[in-house]
Amino acid sequence: MASWYVAIILGIVEGLTEFLPVSSTGHLIITGHLLGFTGPKAETFEIVIQLGAILAVVALYWDRFFGLLRTNPQQRFSGPYGLWLLFLTSLPASIVGLLAHKYIKAYLFSPKTVAIALAVGAIFIFIVEGMSKDQKTDSLDKITPKLALGIGLFQCLALWPGFSRSAATIMGGMLLGAKRTVAAEYSFIAAVPIMFAATGYDFMKNYSLFEFSDLLFLAIGFVVSFISAWIAVKSFIYLLGKLTLRPFAIYRLALAPLVLFFL
């Protein structure tokens, strides 16, 4: 494997970008190319360290996840009903991802495709933020099965590396009537099952690429990703109470040509 500092850098990039609408996969591909860390093992490592970011969300929203184990009369998003909502959100991307996994890995994991996705996603953010929306869903407990499934359909856009799962689900939620902060929080929670399944599936298929000596490298990336994601999620929710997502769209548009020029 590469030097330990590569694991730290990639862990920071993964944690900071996983739940922001800027595409963690896209940033990992770009960073990997700049560091010279590419190939099948690198791609699997980048997916595996997502688990650290996932667990950061579980830790931050522990009460919500624990509430899924039993019905809480004071929280509609709990128990079997909450699990049903998450299932509906995860279903579309799970089916499409399973069917198109080989195609996505073969043709969409490149700087060029990432740059295009960054630009397209930025335009999507500007369009949604510029629309007049009747956002009645102002809490997680008001999310309906129809809204959950609709967000899941938008989540399929995230299978294009560079588009951003966070951007797809947050914008989708806003278009379908959820307030920005609610759409973001549901996006974080709904990311856990789909990302856990994708991470586990990819690692089971490619675990033979790793040797015992690689475990420390994986552990460093995992821990750094967890810490970075914790900071990013807390900061992002705070900022959403004061800002729109347009600054992230501007950042994406600025980054896209740099990717094409330098990589």
Image (cartoon, rainbow, N blue to C red):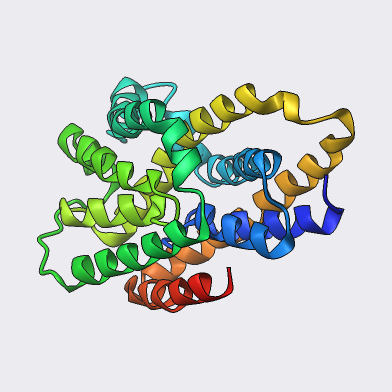
**249 over 237 or under it: above or below:** below
Number of numbered tags placed on the structure image: 0
Asked if residue 76 is positioned above or below residue 84 in the image, the reply reads: below
Q: Does residue 2 appear in the picture of this structure?
A: yes
Whether residue 72 can be seen here: no
Left or right placement of residue 125 versus residue 67 in this view: left
Residue drawn where x is 56% and y is 33% of the image: 199
Q: Quadrant of residue 257?
A: bottom left
Q: In this view of the protein, which residue sits in the foreground, 14 or 30?
A: 30
Residue for point 52% across, 76% down = 261
**Identity of the residue drawn at 48% across and 74% down:** 255
Query: Looking at the image, which is closer to me, 61 or 156?
Result: 156
> Horizontal placement of 173 versus 70: left or right?
left
* Quarter of the image where the C terminus is located: bottom right
x and y percent of residue 145 in the render? Answer: 19, 32
**245 over 117 or under it: above or below:** below
The x, y position of residue 2, in whole percent, is: 83, 50
Residue lying at the far right in this picture: please name it.
Answer: 213
Q: Is residue 170 above or below residue 55?
A: below
Q: Nearer the viewer, residue 5 or 243?
A: 5
State which quarter of the image contains the N terminus: top right
In x, y percent, where is residue 47? 60, 41
> Foreground: 109 or 247?
109
Residue 74, by quadrant, is top left
Q: Position of residue 134 (x, y in %)?
A: 10, 60
Q: Is residue 139 left or right of residue 136?
A: right
